[in-house]
Each structure stands twice: as structure tokens, then as C-alpha cells.
Image (cartoon, grey):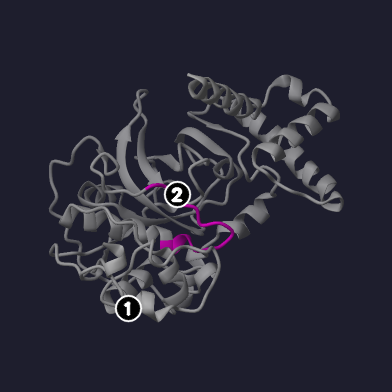
Amino acid sequence: MGKLFLLAILLAMVLGVAKGMEIIEKDLAAEESLWDLYERWRSHHTVSRDLSEKQKRFNVFKANVHHIHKVNQMDKPYKLKLNRFADMTNHEFRNFYSSEVKHFRMLHGSRANTGFMHEKTVNLPASVDWRKQGAVTAVKDQGKCGSCWAFSTVVGVEGINKIKTGQLVSLSEQELVDCEKDNEGCNGGLMEHAYDFIKKSEGITTERLYPYTARDGRCDLAKKNAPVVTIDGHEMVPANDENALMKAVANQPVSVAIDASGSNMQFYSEGVYTGESCGKELDHGVAVVGYGTAVDGTKYWIVKNSWGPEWGENGYIRMQRGVDAEEGICGITMEASYPLKRSSDNPKPPKDEL
């Protein structure tokens, strides 16, 4: 009984802190109340700042607070919140996660011409959610490393492996960061290169065997040479075609690139993101794991991000679908790809993975 009471007290404290992170008019009333909000935010997110940097960070935080509050007063189908990025400028935030997809596309030439095995998919379901099919692992966190391309790729491979084998296995982003040399680890890359690497390497190993460190490292060949999931290559979804992306997503989770540069993306909390502050300067790799329609009729994509479960809707964002622009919201249809896996065959896992 005592343990249950203690648990209830702790839960109330957690909920109290979480509620305290909401911005109310009282917080905006004076510099002193904003400082109080900043200290509560720092405590909640265990953010340590030295005295020389604290004033600078507070000024950034204050500007972000006003932006979040202003947007939340508007009649938008989504809301923003004070998350762990709240004392970072938008420029710093972009450097934090950027995979520089557009840069790597220009560097490595135009998209490869591949087949599109899902072209003949008909009678598309009204909604799809691969999480409900057990084909999506828990939300991960790339940390201060521009390795989102690796996380996007891994979502695709984890998904098709579950579909083909019935087994959901959390796979290693760090193997891609350390060993895949067509990309540049924490400095960004393209998902298609990662898919090529996994095929040529005859598979990829598990997260447990080759855990994520959020930094560039030397390729551990012993771990790399213990693959547990193979693929047979990848295909590109026809660009600038939302219907083609729907066909692909109806069959499996799909890697995509987006322009995630807007402040509203930085502080996204819930709802259907309509992308007023994004264009098509692709800089972030994510994965579409479903689609649907909101109660008000707004169509959306279900997008798995790699900024941890506290960001957005438990680590996900719903992004508007069926927009006028052919590239889709934030360029989501421009660089979509998915892995091929023709059979349920996989290498036997190492003994310590059994």
C-alpha cells in the first residue's frame, strides 16, 4: 500500500512538472516570471548552463517562448510546446540534426532509376498504421549527430523484416554511421546509400550488439560481420507523387526526406502539421509509417522521427497529406525510398543475441 502511495505522489510530481511547462499569460507578464519559467524548464530537462552562457540562452529561450505562445493562439490544426530545444536558436537546431540531404543529392548526382513494385497497388485502404501491425520499433534519439539518414533507413529495414518474417528486431544505426563510407556519419548522407551498403554487406546487425553512441566511430568489423537481417536492395518511389507514396506506405514503412528547418517543426507538439514555415530544402531523414484522416477531414502522413519520444506526439509527427504542391508538405515526396526483401531468410544471429 505504501509503495502505491509513493508511486502516486511521484506521478503527481511528474505531471505537475509537465503541466508547469505549459506557457500561460502569467509567465509572460514580466522578466522575472520568464526567468522562473526558464529555471523550471532547465530543471525539467536537466539542462546545465554556465553563468557566462546563461543570459544568452535565456534571451533565446524568451524569444522562443513568445513564438510558441503566439502560434498557439492562432487557429492552427497543431500546437507547439516548450521541449528540450527551447533555448536553441533555429540555426543551432538545424545544425543539431541536419543530414544535408539536398547537399548530398547534388554531390552524388540525380536519383537512380529503379523499378516501383507497388505501382499496381489498387484499392488503397483509407488508413494505414504500421505501428499497429507491430512493424515499428520504439522511437529512438539521434542525439547531437546528423545521422537521421541512418535512423530513416533502419525504420525501413525493421519494417520490411517484420512483414516478411513476423519478427520485429531493433537494428543498428551505429553500424551505418561507422561503416557506411558513401555517407558521412554524423555529417549527413542519403538513405539509398545506406540501403546499398546493407545489401552489399549481406545484412545489418542488431542495436543490442552494436549500440548507438551519437558520434562517429571506427567501424567494428566483428560486429559488422554478425548480420541478423538482410535485404535484396531498394527502390525509389516516383518523385513528386503523393499517390505513389501512398501506394508504397500501404505496403511497408518508407524512408523520406523533409525540410525540417522551420521553428514550428522545432517545437511541434501535437496535431496535423501544415508546414507554413517549411519549403523543399531537404535536410532531414525520417520515415512514413502510415497515413490517415483527422476528425476534421484533414489528411495526414504518420511520420516517425528520431528526436526522442518527448518531441511531438510521443516522437511522431502527423504531416498534412493531399496538399497542392506536387512535392508534398516540406518536400516529403521528393526523396522517398524503401528496402526490398523477397523472402523470410536471414542469417542466424550470434549466440549472445539468442
Magenta stretch contains residue 275: no
Counting from the top left corner in percent of width and height, residue 309 is at: 48, 43
Rendered view: 69 above or below 61: above
Q: Which residues are magenta?
A: 138-150
Q: Is 143 within the magenta?
A: yes
Residue contact between numbered discs 2 and 1, judged by CB atoms under 8 Å: no
- Give the amino acid type for the residue marked by disc 2 in the picture: Asn
Seen from the viewer's position, the closer of residues 344 and 86 is: 344
Query: Mark 1 — residue?
Result: 225
Q: Which mark is residue 132?
A: none
Q: Is residue 233 above or below residue 91?
A: below
Which residue is under mark 2?
Answer: 305
The residue carrying pointer 1 sits among few (fewer than 14), some (14 to 19) or many (20 or more) residues within 10 Å by Cα, namely some
Q: Quadrant of residue 63?
A: top right
Residue 168, position as x, y percentages in the image:
26, 53
- Across and down, in percent, residue 313 comes to 46, 36
